[in-house]
Image (cartoon, rainbow, N blue to C red):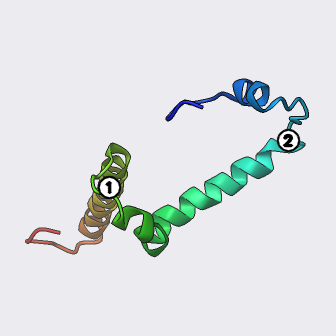
Amino acid sequence: MEVNKKLTSLEFDQHIQDDNDRLLSDPGEYQRLIGRLIYLTITRPDIAFAKSKKQSTIYRISVEAEYRSLASTVAELVWLRGLLSELGVGLNGPV
């Protein structure tokens, strides 16, 4: 087999001569599992640390996730500053 060859499911089945590939009875269960794994890797950096520690380069998706997190934090800080100003609490310095 060629190195780095990508196979689709049909090509893989034809390659191993297996026609017994059945569909999932509930694809939502699989989607929820993947969603939970993604949530854990975002909220628990210690879980994702072992894979990221071995990387020699930073992938674009990691940088995009950091920017999204930063944008969310800034939006919350702007909202809090507006709330405090409506309550009459003046902030002179940076947030």
81 on left or right of 28: left
Question: Going from the N terminus, do you reach mark 1 or mark 2 first?
Answer: 2
Quadrant of the image containing the C terminus: bottom left
Provide the secondary structure element on which disc 1 rests: helix
Tell me the CA gap for discs 1 and 2: 34 Å
Secondary element under disc 2, as helix, strand or loop, is loop
Q: Quadrant of residue 91?
A: bottom left
Residue 14 in picture, x, y percent from top left: 78, 24
Q: Position of residue 37 (x, y in %)?
A: 60, 60
Locate residue 35, reporting x and y percent: 63, 54
Question: Three-letter amino acid code at disc 1?
Answer: Glu
Q: Residue at x 89, y 36 (%)?
A: 22
| Residue 24, numbered label | 2
Q: Is residue 84 left or right of residue 95?
A: right
Quadrant of the drawing holding the N terminus: top right
Residue 28 vertical position relative to residue 70 in the rendered view, above or below = above
Q: How many marks?
A: 2
- Residue located at (38% from left, 62% from top): 52
Q: Amino acid at mark 2?
A: Leu
For this orientation, the residue located farthest to the front is: 1
- What residue lies at 85% left-to-right and 41% top-to-bottom? 24
Which residue is located at x 80 percent, y 43 percent?
27
Question: Which numbered tag is attached to residue 75?
Answer: none
- Mark 1 or 2: in front is 2
Q: Residues within 10 Å of mark 2 (few under 14, many from 20)?
A: few
- The residue carrying pointer 1 sits among few (fewer than 14), some (14 to 19) or many (20 or more) residues within 10 Å by Cα, namely few
Considering only vertical position in the picture, is 28 above or below 73? above
Furthest residue in direction left, as rendered: 92
Instruction: State the residue in front, 28 or 14.
Output: 14
Residue, disc 1: 66
Is 60 placed left or right of 31 in the picture? left
Nearer to me, 39 or 84: 39
